[in-house]
Image (spheres, grey):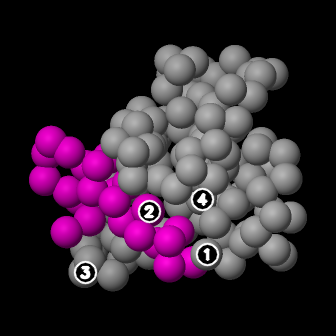
Amino acid sequence: MTKQEAYHINPAVLAYLGDAVYELFVRQTLVDSGQIHVDAMSRGAVKCVRAEGQASAIKKLFPQLTEEEQTLVRRARNKKVTSKPRNVDIQAYKWATAFEALIGYLHLSGQIQREEELMEEAVRTASEPEQSPLK
């Protein structure tokens, strides 16, 4: 798919895909870290993929994004929420959705190196200030 085609996909659809891509990336990173306790891996994964962690990551990453990426993030963040998320602040939810949409867009448009770069940084950010569960 071209960048242009991917860019015009509904942000909710991009977020749907981005959520799965990021979750798999986090789990793969945990497995690659040599961690052998599934409980510890699950806690580490939750810390990285929860809405608050993703929201924090995209806010810190935002200045590093290209103009096109920033526009996509704003479009996804500003999309009307049709269902109220449970146990999460609506603003954190919207930022997390924007992060997932960006990952989905990068994945669909074949920008895998950029996708991995941002996901690696997001994992580091989501793990602060404590020591990263993915080291």
Q: Amino acid at mark 3?
A: Gly
Q: Where is the C terminus found, in terms of image quarters?
A: bottom left
Q: Are marks 2 and 1 in contact (CB under 8 Å)?
A: no
Q: Are marks 4 and 3 in contact (CB under 8 Å)?
A: no
Tell me which label, 2 or 4, sits earlier in the chain.
4
Q: Amino acid at mark 1?
A: Gln
Q: Position of residue 88 (x, y in %)?
A: 51, 22
Give the CA distance from mark 4 to mark 3: 25 Å
Q: Residue at x 50, y 79 (%)?
A: 113
Q: Position of residue 26 (x, y in %)?
A: 43, 64
Q: Position of residue 33 (x, y in %)?
A: 26, 77
Q: Nearer the viewer, residue 54 or 46?
A: 54
Tell me which label, 4 or 1, sits earlier in the chain.
4
Q: Mark 3 — residue? A: 34
Give the CA distance from mark 2 to mark 4: 8 Å
Q: Mark 2 — residue? A: 119
- 135 relative to 60 in the view: left or right: left
Q: Are marks 2 and 4 in contact (CB under 8 Å)?
A: yes
- The image shows residue 115, relative to residue 70, as above or below, that is below
Q: Mark 4 — residue? A: 103
Q: Quick check: is 46 in the magenta stretch?
A: no
Give the magenta range: 112-135
Tell me which label, 3 or 2, sits earlier in the chain.
3
